Image (tube, rainbow, N blue to C red):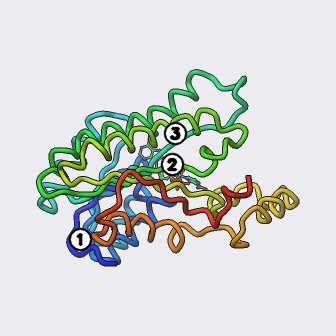
Amino acid sequence: MQLENKVIVVTGGASGIGGAISRVLVARGAKVVAVDINAEAGESLTKDLGANVRFLLGDVSEQDVATNAMEMATSSFGGLDGLVNNAHASRQAMFNELTEEQWDLSFNTGFRATRQFMAAAYPLLAVNGGSVVNFGSGSAIVGQQTQAAYASAKEAIRGLSRVTANEWAKDNIRVNVVSPMALTAGVKAWSEAFPKMYQDSLEKVPLGRFGDPETDVAPVVAFLLSDDSRYMTGQTLMADGGANKLY
Ligand SMILES: NC(=O)c1ccc[n+]([C@@H]2O[C@H](COP(=O)([O-])OP(=O)(O)OC[C@H]3O[C@@H](n4cnc5c(N)ncnc54)[C@H](O)[C@@H]3O)[C@@H](O)[C@H]2O)c1
């Protein structure tokens, strides 16, 4: 599906899954405003994608960053058609060991930033209708250990998405969630040190491999931003190789 001339704001859009999303959206004809705290990754994204991308350096949990991103979309590309709330920083720890600071980090960069970007985007999306894609996680849905702060923020995002899908449908703004799980990005850090755990995790993926951000997640996001999904709202699509079924 094509995204010719659609203008999309992507949070955490310079590297990781967000970087893959920015690249796939531009390859399909979109103009992207990528918001990220990583200046170096932003620079390399801009070098690769040229005039089809604008990079905004900032922490998504700060209110004015959301406002600035919408201003950049308007001044650079003339409006807004879509928003991807991808950025989310969190620390893993057992529930009893999580600090207040860790809870705040997860809720501020995950839930709060998503809410603020949605609020800032609403007036622009309401002009011609549009699509919001928020990020959940399969590990939140299955309740994996050590994910309490992360999973709680992710499920709050899903609740917000379902309600706004209903409230904003009158403006033809769709709100959906992509929940990835079992990605190469998630296991990379520990796979060599824990080969047995790696093998056990792999066996929990019915499709028999870990997912790739660029080919397995970004195209799902692109679909939800495109007119091909115009009759879909309030959904959660799991990009997880079927893994959630086996937990
Ligand atoms: N990686 C996985 O296996 C996995 C699995 C399920 C869900 N997810 C979700 O997918 C999304 C992306 O995950 P990822 O692994 O690519 O994340 P990541 O940690 O690689 O970060 C993605 C980008 O967000 C930026 N970022 C982080 N904090 C920021 C902040 N406060 N303000 C602005 N930018 C910020 C980073 O600099 C980076 O460019 C997240 O919502 C994550 O929860 C990831």
Residue 114 located left or right of residue 156 = left
Whole-Å distance between the Cαs marked 3 and 1? Answer: 36 Å
Asked if residue 202 is positioned above or below residue 175 in the image, the reply reads below
Q: Could you tell me which residue is drawn at 83 percent across and 56 percent down?
A: 197
Q: Earlier in the sequence, mark 1 or mark 2?
A: 1
- Percent from the top left, x then y, of residue 222? 38, 68
Instruction: Give the Cα separation between the discs numbered 1 and 2.
Output: 30 Å
Which quadrant, please, contains the N terminus?
bottom left
* Viewer can see residue 38: no
Which residue does the numbered mark 3 point to in the structure image? 155
Quadrant of residue 19 in the image? Answer: bottom left
Amino acid type, residue under disc 2 in the picture: Gly
Disc 1 or disc 2, which is closer to the eye? Answer: 2
Say whether residue 11 is left or right of residue 68: right
Name the residue: 22% across, 67% down: 6
The residue under label 2 is 136
Residue 114 screen position, x and y as percent: 37, 41
SS under mark 1? helix
